[in-house]
Image: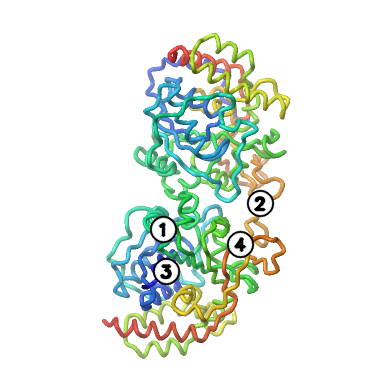
Amino acid sequence: MPTRIIIDTDPGVDDALAFLLALASPEIQLEALTTTQGNVTLETATRNALAVLELANAAHIPVTAGSVLPLVQPLRASAYVHGVSGIGNSKLPPAKNKPREGHAVDYLIQRVLAEPGELSIFPIGPLTNIAMAIRKEPKFAKSVKELVIMGGAIHESGNVTPLAEFNIWVDPHAAHIVFHSGIPITLIPLDVTHKCLLKQEHIDRLMKINSPISRFIKDAIEVYFKFSYERGFAGCALHDPLTLATIIAPELLTLKEYFVDVDHSGGPAMGKTFADVFNVTKKPANMKVAMEVRGEQFIELFLQRTEELARKIKE
Amino acid sequence: MSTSPHPSPLPKGEGTDVPKRILIDTDPGIDDSLAILLALASPEISLEGLSVVHGNCSLEQATTNALSILELANASGMPVAVGCELPLVQPSLLAPETHGNTGLGYAKLPTPRIKPTRQHGCDFLIERIMSEPGEFSLVAIGPLTNVALAIRQEPRIVKSLKELIVMGGAIRYEGNTTALAEFNTYADPHAAHIVYHAGIPTTLVPLDVTYQCVLTQGDVERLLQIESPLTRFIADATRFYMEFHDEFQGVQGCVINDPLALALTFAPELCDYQELPVDVDISGGISLGKTIGDFYNYNKKPANMKVALGVRPRDFIELFLERMEKLASEIR
């Protein structure tokens, strides 16, 4: 039985790549997307989500729009990483489909409560929608099977402040709510995603397949390459797709159980995720954290899956 | 100080104007209950629903209390929508020492027969406000969790609310929960932050004015001259509240915060106001939940609300007593 998931997302170049990997993976049944502000505004995120699904012949997957703003912090967006459009220089045709009526928070509550213990949620953007669902419906936390969150930086440097990772920094209050909700969580922090680098040679390999999928990936990732090179990386980190390794290749990840908290006090550590590695607080672990990854093997898996998808989807 | 004109006569309650349409977000709570009763007793306004939030007591208890109060006042047709059980980020904080274990002091009301609506408190607020933009005044007299979540879920309510009156904060006055912070704001400072900066036309009713409005034992005895379940309720609920005020704050009588906020919907002349930039501390230090009025505009920010800083307390208490007497005489 494939694992049934909903992705909560702010696409976002690597978000889009995560949808493609999910659609290309028989171990996964992608049942819905919910969108949030983050890499881009909510409107752009929703448009991109619909457009990427249509590109991959997956327009049947419902998309529901969620939070316009983080809970307490002002709106951020990261055009320097993802391009103004959120998906780099790619020019997808405008989506024909519309998002569902209603709010993502209510959609998540409704789906999860309808089948308690069945659905895993993969939040790969700021955690605003998930936090609101937890506070709005107290039964939500007990009914979600699992959250696999792309976010945080434990030992690794932050990618938006010296300490903080973008998704958590955008809405640290939401992260605080989610981390302490009691939902089983696996965290995929920069510590591992920075070891999964998609390089130019990989794009060249994908481009041997003549498909809108390979062209989309090439165009989408150009801006992201430029940003990554400026930061001294040899390629683009596949942050969001790596969350799916928990289903399709869990053996590539080393998970540690930690008590993890997030700073929301508004000082220089705002948005920092810290793991109590030595358990000095004597608090029980609240999540599993991916601390090591076999990055090259993950990249190879990602390429094989997207190649398969690209072969299926021709003009 | 930009004050309203000198004390104008109190409204007679017989005006020909269409009543002002009100929603109350509440955590009843003794003074919340008195505010609900004042709303029902005031012909200038039309109370169209309650949303309930955690605060003075648990969400479940607050809901039961809201329903019981409505039944007591023969207003059981009023919709009550259950909202948020927990503050956004902070752990739950309830106030049994102030309001008693049931939230209503020594009062014992029958178990309500009516049930809350199935709609969530946030959705109720959103639906009512969006169905008739510009119509509703929202009086928020508990922690601001429901209002904040509603704003984040449906940002258009910000432009669609006519006004928001918030009982909360302590600007120059000491806190009633920490040395600096007032209870409603301290119970969910992050929600207060969201609401204060949302852009809704807001009036803040802080402890600076509510602590001038003390209901005394003499006032309660005056009410008890009318034989009614309503006056007995007020006497039993406020007796506990008065013991708390005496023991913890050296106040003889009890401070009726929430009814003052409610009264300002139809009798704004009871207070003097100043437009101020107001913020709330959410940094988690010893000032957590402190509401800050930037009187000298150090931060060069525009005013985001009107703050009640002066009050004519006996005018207000007299108004409250007259309204309660009238309502009590109808409920025997």
Q: Position of residue B256 (x, y in %)?
A: 59, 25
- What residue did someone put label 4 on? A271
Query: Marks 2 and 4, Cα distance to the nearest angstrom?
Result: 13 Å
Q: Nearer the viewer, mark 3 or mark 4?
A: 4
Residue at the image position 54 percent from the left and 58 percent from the top: A182
Which residue corresponds to mark 3?
Answer: A85
Tell me: residue A26, above or below residue B214: below
Left or right of A212? Residue B274 is: right
Category of crowding for the residue at label 2, using alpha-carbon neighbours closer than 10 angstroms: few (below 14), some (14–19), many (at least 20) = some
Q: Which is more toward the observer, B139 or B218? A: B218
Name the secondary structure under disc 2.
loop
Query: Residue B249: x, y in percent?
Result: 72, 28
Residue at 34% across, 66% down: A50
Label 2 sits on residue: B283
Q: Pointer 1 indicates a residue of which chain?
A: A
Please state which amino acid type lies under the numbered disc 2: Ser
Question: Closest to the observer: B13 or B59?
Answer: B59
Amino acid type shown at disc 1: Pro
Q: Which residue is mark 1?
A: A116
Front tag of 1 and 2: 1
Of mark 1 and mark 4, the one earlier in the sequence is 1
Is tag 3's residue or tag 1's residue first in the polypeptide sequence? 3
Spatial separation of the CA atoms under disc 3 and disc 1: 36 Å
The lab-note entry on whether marks 1 and 4 share a chain reads yes
Q: Pinpoint the chain carrying mark 2.
A: B
Q: Amino acid at mark 4?
A: Gly
Q: Quadrant of the C terminus of chain B?
A: top left
User: How dense is the environment of label 1, judged by Cα within 10 Å: few (below 14), some, or many (20 and up)?
Assistant: some
